[in-house]
Image (cartoon, rainbow, N blue to C red):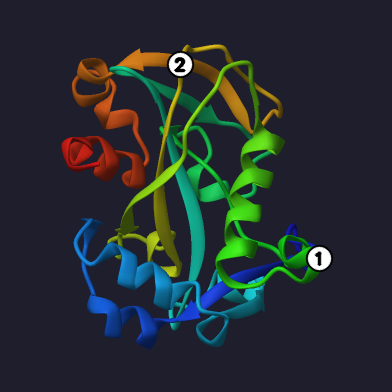
Amino acid sequence: MSKYAGEQVLVVPRPLFDSIGTFQGIRTHGLEAAIDRLLDPENHFFMDREEAEADPTHKQLIPYCLIRCGTSILNYTRGKSGGEDRLHAKLSVGVGGHINPVDTGNGRTGKDAYFAAVERELQEELVFDTAHTNRIAALLNDDSNEVGRVHLGVVHVIDLENTRVHAREDAIANLVFSELVELQGILFPNLESWSQHVIQDIANL
Protein backbone atom coordinates (compact mmCIF):
# COMPACT_ATOMS: atom_id res chain seq x y z
CA MET A 1 0.00 0.00 0.00
CA SER A 2 1.21 3.50 -0.79
CA LYS A 3 2.45 5.46 2.24
CA TYR A 4 0.18 8.31 1.05
CA ALA A 5 -2.93 6.12 1.44
CA GLY A 6 -5.05 7.94 -1.12
CA GLU A 7 -4.16 11.43 0.15
CA GLN A 8 -5.39 14.22 -2.13
CA VAL A 9 -3.26 17.38 -2.41
CA LEU A 10 -3.84 20.77 -4.02
CA VAL A 11 -1.93 21.36 -7.26
CA VAL A 12 -1.65 23.95 -10.01
CA PRO A 13 -0.70 23.07 -13.60
CA ARG A 14 2.93 23.84 -14.41
CA PRO A 15 1.88 26.04 -17.38
CA LEU A 16 0.01 28.31 -14.94
CA PHE A 17 3.15 28.66 -12.83
CA ASP A 18 5.17 29.37 -15.97
CA SER A 19 2.68 32.05 -17.07
CA ILE A 20 3.12 33.82 -13.72
CA GLY A 21 6.83 33.93 -14.43
CA THR A 22 9.21 31.02 -13.94
CA PHE A 23 11.95 31.68 -11.39
CA GLN A 24 14.47 29.86 -9.23
CA GLY A 25 14.71 30.60 -5.51
CA ILE A 26 12.76 33.37 -3.76
CA ARG A 27 10.39 35.77 -5.53
CA THR A 28 8.84 38.78 -3.81
CA HIS A 29 7.87 41.05 -6.72
CA GLY A 30 4.35 40.81 -8.14
CA LEU A 31 3.46 38.67 -5.14
CA GLU A 32 -0.15 39.72 -4.63
CA ALA A 33 -1.12 39.14 -8.27
CA ALA A 34 0.65 35.77 -8.32
CA ILE A 35 -1.08 34.61 -5.13
CA ASP A 36 -4.45 35.71 -6.51
CA ARG A 37 -3.95 33.52 -9.58
CA LEU A 38 -2.58 30.51 -7.70
CA LEU A 39 -5.43 30.55 -5.17
CA ASP A 40 -8.20 31.19 -7.71
CA PRO A 41 -10.42 28.06 -7.55
CA GLU A 42 -10.52 28.07 -11.35
CA ASN A 43 -6.74 27.50 -11.43
CA HIS A 44 -6.16 24.64 -8.98
CA PHE A 45 -7.57 21.24 -8.10
CA PHE A 46 -6.86 18.18 -5.95
CA MET A 47 -4.73 15.32 -7.25
CA ASP A 48 -3.73 11.97 -5.74
CA ARG A 49 -0.49 12.66 -3.89
CA GLU A 50 1.30 9.53 -5.08
CA GLU A 51 0.66 10.65 -8.66
CA ALA A 52 1.55 14.27 -7.94
CA GLU A 53 4.91 13.40 -6.37
CA ALA A 54 6.05 11.93 -9.69
CA ASP A 55 4.40 14.47 -12.03
CA PRO A 56 6.45 17.61 -12.79
CA THR A 57 3.66 18.91 -15.05
CA HIS A 58 1.94 20.04 -11.83
CA LYS A 59 3.11 21.92 -8.74
CA GLN A 60 1.84 21.06 -5.26
CA LEU A 61 1.17 24.25 -3.28
CA ILE A 62 2.95 24.19 0.10
CA PRO A 63 2.66 26.82 2.84
CA TYR A 64 6.22 27.19 4.22
CA CYS A 65 6.22 29.13 7.48
CA LEU A 66 9.34 30.83 8.81
CA ILE A 67 8.86 31.36 12.55
CA ARG A 68 11.05 33.93 14.27
CA CYS A 69 11.44 36.00 17.41
CA GLY A 70 13.67 38.94 16.62
CA THR A 71 16.86 37.48 15.14
CA SER A 72 16.17 33.99 16.56
CA ILE A 73 14.66 31.55 14.07
CA LEU A 74 12.88 28.28 14.79
CA ASN A 75 14.51 25.25 13.19
CA TYR A 76 14.15 21.51 13.56
CA THR A 77 15.23 18.16 12.14
CA ARG A 78 12.74 16.38 9.91
CA GLY A 79 11.88 13.13 11.68
CA LYS A 80 11.12 9.69 10.23
CA SER A 81 7.37 10.15 10.72
CA GLY A 82 7.29 13.07 8.29
CA GLY A 83 5.54 12.51 4.96
CA GLU A 84 8.53 13.22 2.71
CA ASP A 85 11.28 10.58 2.98
CA ARG A 86 13.54 12.56 0.63
CA LEU A 87 13.88 15.28 3.29
CA HIS A 88 14.39 12.98 6.30
CA ALA A 89 17.12 14.13 8.74
CA LYS A 90 17.48 17.51 7.01
CA LEU A 91 17.46 20.70 9.06
CA SER A 92 14.50 22.97 8.23
CA VAL A 93 13.31 26.49 9.06
CA GLY A 94 9.96 25.90 7.34
CA VAL A 95 6.82 24.56 9.01
CA GLY A 96 3.84 23.59 6.87
CA GLY A 97 2.49 20.95 4.58
CA HIS A 98 0.09 20.00 1.85
CA ILE A 99 -3.38 21.44 1.35
CA ASN A 100 -6.03 18.71 1.53
CA PRO A 101 -9.78 18.49 0.79
CA VAL A 102 -10.54 18.76 4.52
CA ASP A 103 -9.51 22.42 4.26
CA THR A 104 -12.49 23.12 2.00
CA GLY A 105 -14.97 22.31 4.78
CA ASN A 106 -17.91 24.64 5.41
CA GLY A 107 -17.90 25.65 1.76
CA ARG A 108 -14.44 27.22 1.84
CA THR A 109 -12.68 27.72 -1.50
CA GLY A 110 -9.69 29.62 -2.83
CA LYS A 111 -7.93 31.84 -0.29
CA ASP A 112 -10.26 30.85 2.54
CA ALA A 113 -9.40 27.17 2.10
CA TYR A 114 -5.72 27.97 1.77
CA PHE A 115 -5.52 29.98 5.00
CA ALA A 116 -7.55 27.29 6.79
CA ALA A 117 -4.87 24.82 5.68
CA VAL A 118 -2.08 27.04 7.01
CA GLU A 119 -3.72 27.27 10.43
CA ARG A 120 -4.42 23.53 10.48
CA GLU A 121 -0.79 22.69 9.70
CA LEU A 122 0.54 25.06 12.35
CA GLN A 123 -1.81 23.73 15.02
CA GLU A 124 -1.08 20.09 14.08
CA GLU A 125 2.66 20.54 14.29
CA LEU A 126 3.25 23.16 16.99
CA VAL A 127 1.95 24.46 20.31
CA PHE A 128 2.09 28.25 20.57
CA ASP A 129 2.23 29.75 24.06
CA THR A 130 2.73 33.23 22.65
CA ALA A 131 1.01 35.74 20.40
CA HIS A 132 2.08 35.76 16.77
CA THR A 133 1.44 37.42 13.42
CA ASN A 134 1.27 35.72 10.04
CA ARG A 135 1.88 37.20 6.58
CA ILE A 136 2.75 35.91 3.10
CA ALA A 137 6.21 37.19 2.21
CA ALA A 138 7.32 35.36 -0.97
CA LEU A 139 7.01 32.45 -3.35
CA LEU A 140 9.69 29.76 -3.32
CA ASN A 141 10.67 27.49 -6.21
CA ASP A 142 13.60 25.12 -6.63
CA ASP A 143 13.63 23.00 -9.77
CA SER A 144 17.19 21.78 -9.07
CA ASN A 145 16.05 18.60 -7.31
CA GLU A 146 13.25 16.01 -7.59
CA VAL A 147 11.38 17.28 -4.54
CA GLY A 148 11.41 20.91 -5.66
CA ARG A 149 10.32 20.12 -9.21
CA VAL A 150 6.88 19.03 -8.02
CA HIS A 151 6.33 21.63 -5.27
CA LEU A 152 5.84 25.40 -5.04
CA GLY A 153 6.29 27.08 -1.69
CA VAL A 154 4.30 30.02 -0.34
CA VAL A 155 6.60 31.56 2.27
CA HIS A 156 4.90 32.90 5.39
CA VAL A 157 6.71 34.93 8.04
CA ILE A 158 5.37 34.38 11.55
CA ASP A 159 6.72 36.81 14.15
CA LEU A 160 6.47 35.86 17.82
CA GLU A 161 6.49 37.86 21.04
CA ASN A 162 8.63 35.16 22.71
CA THR A 163 10.04 31.71 21.95
CA ARG A 164 7.49 29.63 23.90
CA VAL A 165 6.75 27.24 21.04
CA HIS A 166 6.80 23.43 21.32
CA ALA A 167 6.59 20.55 18.85
CA ARG A 168 3.34 18.61 18.82
CA GLU A 169 4.40 15.68 16.61
CA ASP A 170 7.40 13.41 15.99
CA ALA A 171 7.95 14.74 12.47
CA ILE A 172 9.43 17.85 14.13
CA ALA A 173 12.50 16.72 16.09
CA ASN A 174 15.11 18.73 18.02
CA LEU A 175 13.15 21.98 17.81
CA VAL A 176 15.30 24.96 18.80
CA PHE A 177 15.62 28.67 18.13
CA SER A 178 18.97 29.61 16.57
CA GLU A 179 20.44 32.98 15.78
CA LEU A 180 20.40 34.00 12.12
CA VAL A 181 24.20 34.22 12.06
CA GLU A 182 24.39 30.51 12.98
CA LEU A 183 21.94 29.51 10.24
CA GLN A 184 23.85 31.56 7.70
CA GLY A 185 27.14 30.04 8.88
CA ILE A 186 27.87 26.74 10.60
CA LEU A 187 24.35 25.29 10.20
CA PHE A 188 23.80 26.32 6.58
CA PRO A 189 25.15 23.13 4.91
CA ASN A 190 22.68 21.02 6.93
CA LEU A 191 19.60 22.93 5.77
CA GLU A 192 17.22 21.49 3.18
CA SER A 193 17.34 23.40 -0.11
CA TRP A 194 14.17 25.45 0.51
CA SER A 195 15.50 26.56 3.89
CA GLN A 196 18.80 27.57 2.31
CA HIS A 197 16.92 29.80 -0.13
CA VAL A 198 14.91 31.38 2.71
CA ILE A 199 17.99 32.04 4.85
CA GLN A 200 19.94 33.46 1.90
CA ASP A 201 17.15 35.92 1.09
CA ILE A 202 15.82 36.59 4.57
CA ALA A 203 16.66 40.29 4.30
CA ASN A 204 13.97 40.54 1.58
CA LEU A 205 11.29 38.86 3.69
Front residue of this view, candidates 168 and 56? 168
Q: Give above or below for 147 relative to 192.
A: below
x, y (%) of residue 202? 22, 36
Residue linked to disc 1: 106
Amino acid at dot 2: Glu
The part of the image, by quadrant, that contains residue 49 is: bottom right
Residue that mark 2 sits on: 161
Q: Residues within 10 Å of mark 1 (few under 14, many from 20)?
A: few
Amino acid marked by disc 1: Asn
Kind of element beneath mark 2:
loop
- Quadrant of the rendered image containing residue 187: top left
Q: Closest to the observer: 46 or 85?
A: 46
Quarter placement of the C terminus: top left
Residue pictured at 69% horizontal, 46% vertical? 120
Which label's residue is closer to the chain start, 1 or 2? 1
Residue 56 x %, y %: 44, 77
